[in-house]
């Protein structure tokens, strides 16, 4: 008998919900969901909308989303073949949480960039003189 959702915990190393979290926390998934939130799209249009995604990564991500029931792939029997992608009912439930995550990333970008620059500058400073007389080297006894 499968576990009920009340016993699922992403903190449990053996819980299958970690696989779900891995799928929906992926940056390409978040971007594809955001684009498909606007409506049904063809493959080439998706690739144009999502800057920097390779054909291989877009194909892999779409296949995973389709397998998980988040995206529906429709093949129209015409020549040349016409394939469209759309969010399923389940996929649409991710629009708002992932949109909120994307908004948060954009809103806090300057602060995050400043923190990274500060950490990089601090890590490039020479360390104090250690026990062996060499900067940045410590001997613990």
Image (spheres, rainbow, N blue to C red):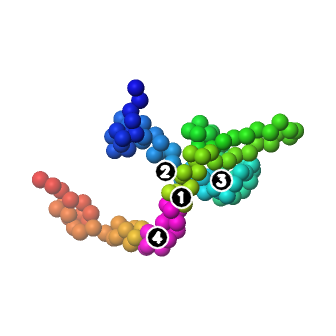
Alpha-carbon distance for marks 3 and 4? 24 Å
Q: Which mark is residue 96?
A: 1
Q: Nearer the viewer, residue 34 or 110?
A: 34
Say which residue appears at 36% left-offset and 41% top-offset: 6
| Marks 3, 2: nearer the viewer | 3
Left or right relative to 140: residue 28 = right
Q: Which mark is residue 108?
A: 4
Label 4 with label 1: CB-CB less than 8 Å: no
Left or right relative to 119: residue 113 = right
The answer to whether residue 116 is visible is: yes
Q: Secondary structure at mark 3?
A: helix
Question: Which residue in the rendered view is the most extreme toward the top?
Answer: 1
Q: Which residues lie in the magenta part?
A: 100-114
Alpha-carbon distance for marks 1 and 2? 14 Å
| Marks 3, 4: nearer the viewer | 3
Q: Position of residue 21 (x, y in %)?
A: 45, 46
């Amino acid at each position: 008998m499968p576990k009920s959702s009340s016993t699922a915990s992403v903190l449990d190393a053996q819980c299958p919900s970690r696989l779900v979290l891995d799928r929906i926390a992926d940056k390409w998934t978040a971007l594809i969901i955001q684009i498909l939130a606007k409506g049904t799209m063809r493959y080439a249009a998706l690739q144009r909308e999502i800057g920097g995604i390779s054909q291989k990564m877009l194909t892999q991500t779409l296949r995973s989303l389709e397998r998980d029931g988040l995206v529906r792939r429709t093949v129209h029997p015409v020549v040349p073949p016409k394939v469209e992608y759309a969010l399923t009912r389940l996929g649409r439930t991710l629009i708002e949480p992932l949109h909120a995550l994307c908004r948060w990333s954009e809103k806090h970008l300057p602060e995050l960039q400043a923190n990274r620059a500060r950490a990089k500058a601090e890590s490039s400073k020479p360390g104090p003189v250690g026990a062996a007389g060499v900067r940045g080297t410590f001997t613990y006894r």
